[in-house]
Amino acid sequence: MLAKVISGTVLGVDGHLVDVEVDIAMGLPTFTIVGLAEGAVRESKDRVKAAIKNSGYDFPNRRITVNLAPADLKKSGTGFDLPIALGILASAGLIDAEILVRACVTGELSLDGGLRPTPGILPIALSARNAGLTYYLVPDANGEEGAVVNGINTVRVATLHEAVELLAGKKEISPIAVCHAKLFHHVETAENDFSEVKGHAHVKRALEVAAAGRHNILLSGPPGSGKTMLARRLPSILPDLSFAEALETTKIYSTMGLIPKDKSLITARPFRAPHHTISDAGLIGGGCHFHKLMRLIGNKRDWNTIIKRGSHHEPT
């Protein structure tokens, strides 16, 4: 029997929906995952099998084939554990197909059937919303993060059994409600406040204009005149983030799994103060995530040229 569950993956900082197709057929017992899956995705076979058994369900002793479509899109991360498990159980008739086709599912399974937090929830939620889906099932720890997106009902689940009960219609689906005004109400206070500066009226005026208009500024003067002291207080007068800017910022934090536990939206404007001797890799990053981003943007040499040129013209 064939079943399909909608999930998602993150490429760069953008979410992409992925169809998790599960086929259970007669034959020797095997469990195969195809569709350009990376190591963490292929390892989900053991987690899914243990989670299904420890949740009180029967794992089919048949030939199981899981296809992650589109097949030419690289799949990474552990968020496919829950959709694969639900696809196997849907093939056994334990899930309402009408609810399943309107839901997106993401989550990493533990061996006892519990759900662990998964990075990249926010970008996938945006893609699910744009695709017109109704529900988005996420791990309990990621509930507030997914609920930030308007237009889709985010539902938190703590275990595989709870997800099955919701999708089978045996348990009422209760979406999470988030007040965006409260998210922006508590803004972090800068460590160095601009109001602490006494005097320097002309420099303060220049910094205010640069912060408001996103202009460049050059501080010049003898040692001890207050250049560094003033520059360190510039972040405290930067304009507040709009909701659209906060979403774009939070997408980056979500992709890297760096959203604090007590926050669901990054509301403080990001600020970096690199030293003038910093290298290209130190400024824009390096490693596997950097090379993935370069493949999305285009030619690495062209991008480095842009960075070098922009470093002389763009504001810090």
Image (tube, grey):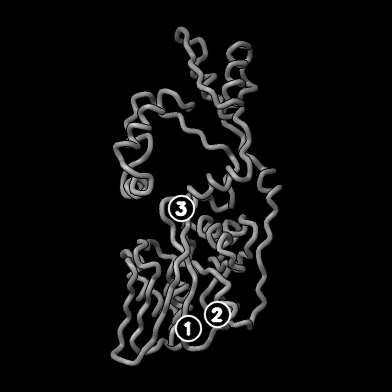
Depth check: give the residue in front, 235 or 127. Answer: 127
Per the image, the residue denoted by label 2 is 164
- The first of marks 3 and 1 along the sequence is 1
Whole-percent x, y for residue 166 in the image: 60, 77
In three-dimensional space, the C-alpha distance between marks 1 and 2, rounded to whole angstroms, equals 8 Å
- The first of marks 1 and 2 along the sequence is 1
Q: Residue at x 54, y 19 (%)?
A: 230
The amino acid at mark 2 is Val
Element at label 2: helix
3 left or right of 62?
right
Q: Residue at x 32, y 31 (%)?
A: 279
Element at label 3: helix
| Marks 3 and 2 close (CB-CB < 8 Å) | no
- Graded by Cα atoms within 10 Å as few (under 14), some (14 to 19) or many (20 or more), the crowding at tag 3 reads many
Q: Quadrant of the N terminus?
A: bottom left
- Graded by Cα atoms within 10 Å as few (under 14), some (14 to 19) or many (20 or more), the crowding at tag 2 reads many
Per the image, the residue denoted by label 3 is 255
Whole-percent x, y for residue 28 in the image: 28, 90
Element at label 1: helix
In three-dimensional space, the C-alpha distance between marks 3 and 1, rounded to whole angstroms, equals 29 Å
Per the image, the residue denoted by label 1 is 89
The amino acid at mark 3 is Thr
Residue 27 to residue 140: above or below:
below
Whole-percent x, y for residue 30 in the image: 30, 84
Depth check: give the residue in front, 279 or 243. Answer: 243
Using the rendered view, name the quadrant where residue 200 is placed. top right
- The first of marks 3 and 2 along the sequence is 2
